[in-house]
Amino acid sequence: MAEEAPFQVFETSQAAKGNRLNPGKLGLYPDRIVYVSQPKLTKVKTQSAKYEQIAQVYIEDGMAFTTLIIETTGGDKIEIPGLKINTANEASRLIKDEVEKKAQPAKIPAGSDLAAEIERLATLHAGGILTDEEFTAAKAKTLGL
């Protein structure tokens, strides 16, 4: 299976401190963010977080460049230095939009009740249309979990 491509990529500036040879890249995927940095010639560092795990996104201004900071609910912090302010603002907005989308409870189709929707999913599962994992995920989404 091929690796999924990000829907947006942001590169840190080569002019920023520590980025001269290998700027970092922040990739926004449908379900997560991934930041890859290479502060030294031989050491690649990858950090990622699912949107559901992101607690806060903010920008720290610097002299010439800004740092985008992403804090997770687990207390981890992903720092992305060397971004121009407009790039940091765009990345922050897109990440916040994705976090908000993932936080919204699932909507049950109009005209049906909760029990009928779960029964429909159970029928699809019993008929082999949905796998165990798909059924569990669809049921959780229907229940707004």
Image: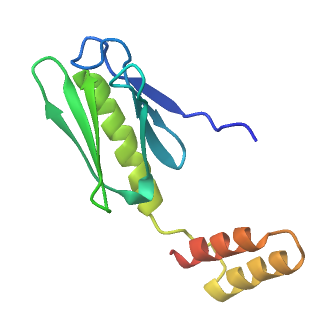
What is the x, y in percent for residue 138?
A: 66, 71
The residue positioned farthest toward the front in the image shown:
42
The residue positioned farthest toward the left in the image shown:
63
Total tally of numbered discs in the picture: 0
Q: Nearer the viewer, residue 94 or 116?
A: 94
Q: Residue at x 25, y 28 (%)?
A: 81
What is the x, y in percent for residue 93?
A: 33, 39
Give the quarter of the image for residue 78.
top left
The residue positioned farthest toward the right in the image shown:
127
Q: Residue at x 40, y 53 (%)?
A: 99
The quarter in which the N terminus is drawn is: top right
Horizontal side of residue 4 vs 32, given as left or right: right
- Image colouring: rainbow
Q: Is residue 127 above or below residue 116?
A: above
Q: Nearer the viewer, residue 114 or 56?
A: 56
Horizontal side of residue 108 vs 12, given as left or right: right
Q: Residue at x 31, y 38 (%)?
A: 92
Q: Is residue 48 above or below residue 62?
A: below
Give the quarter of the image for residue 41.
top left
What is the x, y in percent for residue 61?
A: 13, 30
Q: Residue at x 30, y 18 (%)?
A: 19
Asked whether residue 109 is in view, the answer is no
Horizontal side of residue 14 vs 102, given as left or right: left
What is the x, y in percent for residue 77?
A: 27, 48
Q: Nearer the viewer, residue 94 or 39?
A: 39
Asked whether residue 135 is in view, the answer is yes
Give the quarter of the image for residue 129.
bottom right
